[in-house]
Amino acid sequence: MLKKICSGYCSTPLIYRIGAAFVIGILAGMALSYAGTSMGQEWLHRVVAWISPFGTVLIAMLKMIVIPIIFFSLVCGASSLSVKKFGKLGSGVLLWYLFTSIAASVFGVFLATVMNPRMSNAAELSGRHLMQVGQLRSAGAGGGSVSSFVNGLFVNPFEALASGNFLPVIVFAMIFGIAARTVIDHEQQAGGRHPVEQLIEMFDAALKVCFKIIDWIIEYFPIGVLALTTANFALYGVELFGPYMRIALCVVTGVLLMIFVIYPLLVALICRENPYRFLWGIRSPIVTAFLTRSSAAALPVSMKTAEELKIRKELSSFALPLGATINMDGVCIHLPVFAILAANIFGIDLSVTKLAVLVVSVVFASVGAGGIPGGSIFLLFMVLANMGLDDAQTAMIVALAIGINPLLDMFETACNVTGDNVCNYIVARKGGMIDDSRG
């Protein structure tokens, strides 16, 4: 009987198993949340503490494999292209990310202005989380200058690999791959292959091993999804239907419009094909981002999906890791909502000029989200400061954001990762980087 159940489970398509786990997790989480009102928050946190490890291990496994995939794939990709071709692709990716960030920021500000989020009991709600604001301010302070950003690109590669710091790994892998290509081109061997070519082949073999590990991790997804969803909705689900409902509605509406209307429209106009077929093709990284709340954790799944879409790794190995670091379209929708909320609470008159400054602030802030869960909370300090709020007013709005952030972060991260995959696909389609000859 058990063997028959296991066989039926394994033969069910993974997307259905994940979907079932998600629905069951929501129901179980909301049930625990309401049980916690009578049993006490201490009891609820004890129960969640038993459930959470089954979900956090999924995030840990994905983060375990992400840095090796970035390094091996980017070295292989950079070494297979000429410097001129690589530069052309890189500039195309950067320009696309800049365009989508600006577009998402304008859309986010417009939507927040139209929906005009308000909260009557803001002071009471913010008081619950004011203790955390000082810690966040301290954690996010410093390191925001141009010089520190540039210096941070060139650090010990082994230190960057060990700490999971994306940008230095990307920079070193690109330099290593381009240098390998240069050595191969300038030191042609009279007979046989150049030793550097053999090294690149070894990296390519290591990349295939990493993708096999991802296949194994993906099989654990239903269990991880069930645990993550149950824990998230047990702790924060009630906020969606309570005082934060108007805020949540604003952010979720913006994210869903980006994913299901704006991105498909761009794919349809630029690639001249059915955008929803493509959207279905990238469902795995979107679901992973939604449940893990981490662009970094979703990156291995995005890389695997790019391979299934026949996008050449020369592009995806650069575009996707870079996008997970600097392309945060979901953040560009999330931040304006709290900025407009702050304007409503404190009676700030938002002129066209101030709205334009808000758009620019959100674009620059979004680059610093870093692909980590809850990264947008740190960026609120900068956006609110540019609006002219004092420390006490900023603390109040950040405290409000902390109350609903874990759930909004799920939608925001799904939007971020969708934007990365859309960029990768459009640049690949327009640049002839999709290998349609592959079976």
Image (cartoon, grey):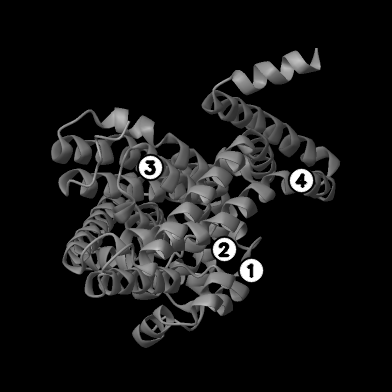
Mark 4 and mark 1: span between their CA atoms?
A: 21 Å
Between 424 and 432, the one nearer to me in the picture: 432
Q: Is residue 412 visible?
A: yes
Which quadrant of the structure image shows residue 82?
bottom left
The answer to whether mark 4 and mark 1 are in CB contact below 8 A is: no
The answer to whether mark 2 and mark 1 are in CB contact below 8 A is: yes
Secondary structure under tag 4 reads: helix
- Left or right: 37, with 428 as reference point: right
Q: Residue at x 54, y 57 (%)?
A: 373
Sort mark 3 into few (<14), some (14-19) or many (20+) by Cα contacts within 10 Å.
some
Q: Percent x, y for residue 418?
A: 37, 45
Which residue is disc 2 drawn over? 399
Which residue is disc 3 drawn over? 307
Between 424 and 135, the one nearer to me in the picture: 424
Q: Percent x, y for residue 326?
A: 37, 63
Amino acid on which the number 4 mark rests in the picture: Val
Which residue is disc 4 drawn over? 48
Secondary structure under tag 1 reads: helix
Which residue is disc 1 drawn over? 132
Q: Percent x, y for residue 242?
A: 58, 41
Res. 364 mark: none
Mark 2 vs mark 4, foreground winner is 4
